Image: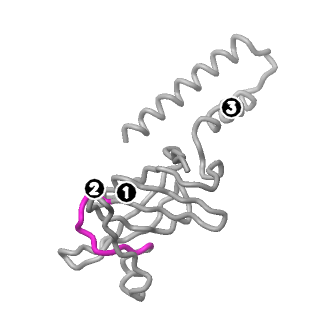
């Protein structure tokens, strides 16, 4: 949330600065659309979008719709054919995940479930397919304690992607 607020403040400041410089230095014939295009171009070079991410491995933040499903680390891998992510959760309360809704999970075969693996630090990790960045994706998690599916929404945020050294 703090990053979004900071990003919004930066965009407003950038828009204000570009607007002022356009008034002071550009000819009177320049249209607002031209100024907006220049600002959009400047912004797009600073903030990566899913289209700008190339094949490789990235550290990326994932927004979750639930505080009970906190993702503390995520590594996104992009290849020509697909994207996948290894998400590390803050706790050990979920036995498995399903990329879809809880209703779909209940009707699915167990081979479609994504079971956790423990990393070297004993944290639960899940390797999930990622269809799109910057878009809500349905995911549900099966509570080990309650033996119940819980619906979640995940957003893999391309603006936070940082390429990892190969």
Horizontal side of 156 relative to 95 (left or right) equals right
Q: Mark 2 to mark 1: distance in Å? A: 7 Å
Q: Mark 3 to mark 1: distance in Å? A: 32 Å
Instruction: Report the residue at 46% width, 68% height from top.
Output: 128
Q: Which of the pair 106/85 is nearer the observer?
A: 85
Instruction: Report the residue at 69% width, 35% height from top.
Output: 41
Query: Please, what secondary structure does the residue beneath circle 3 have?
Result: helix
Q: Residues within 10 Å of mark 2 (few under 14, many from 20)?
A: few
- Please identify the quarter of the rendering in which residue 27 is found: top right
Q: Residues within 10 Å of mark 3 (few under 14, many from 20)?
A: some
- Dot 1 corresponds to which residue? 64
Q: Earlier in the sequence, mark 2 or mark 3?
A: 3
Q: Residues within 10 Å of mark 1 (few under 14, many from 20)?
A: some
Horizontal side of 49 relative to 4 (left or right) equals right
Label number found at residue 36:
3
Q: Which residues are magenta?
A: 89-99
108 lies above or below 1: below
How is the rendered protein coloured? one colour
> Is 98 colored magenta in this rendering?
yes
Query: Please, what secondary structure does the residue beneath circle 2 have?
Result: loop
Tell me where residue 86 appears, x and y as whole percent.
Answer: 43, 62
- Please identify the quarter of the rendering in which residue 91 is found: bottom left
Q: Mark 2 to mark 3: distance in Å? A: 37 Å
- Dot 2 corresponds to which residue? 67
> Is 14 colored magenta in this rendering?
no
Q: Which of the pair 108/112 is nearer the observer?
A: 112
Query: Please, what secondary structure does the residue beneath circle 1 have?
Result: strand
Asked if the residue at tag 1 contacts the one at tag 2, i.e. Cβ–Cβ closer than 8 Å, the answer is: yes
Tell me where residue 159 appears, x and y as whole percent.
Answer: 52, 44
Q: Residue furthest left?
A: 145
Horizontal side of 145 relative to 104 (left or right) equals left
């Amino acid at each position: 949330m703090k990053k979004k607020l900071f990003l919004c403040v930066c965009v407003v400041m950038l828009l204000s600065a570009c607007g002022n410089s356009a008034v002071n230095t550009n000819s009177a014939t320049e249209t607002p659309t031209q100024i907006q295009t220049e600002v959009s171009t400047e912004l797009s070079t600073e903030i990566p979008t899913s289209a700008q991410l190339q094949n490789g491995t990235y550290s990326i933040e994932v927004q979750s719709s639930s505080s009970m499903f906190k993702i503390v680390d995520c590594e996104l891998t992009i290849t020509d054919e697909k994207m996948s992510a290894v998400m590390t959760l803050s706790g050990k309360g979920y036995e498995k995940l399903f990329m879809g809704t809880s209703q779909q999970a209940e009707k699915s075969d167990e081979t479609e479930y994504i079971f956790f693996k423990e990393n070297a630090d004993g944290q639960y990790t899940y390797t999930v397919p990622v269809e799109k960045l910057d878009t809500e994706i349905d995911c549900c998690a099966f509570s080990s304690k309650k033996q119940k599916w819980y619906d979640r929404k995940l957003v893999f945020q391309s603006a936070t992607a940082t390429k990892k050294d190969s």
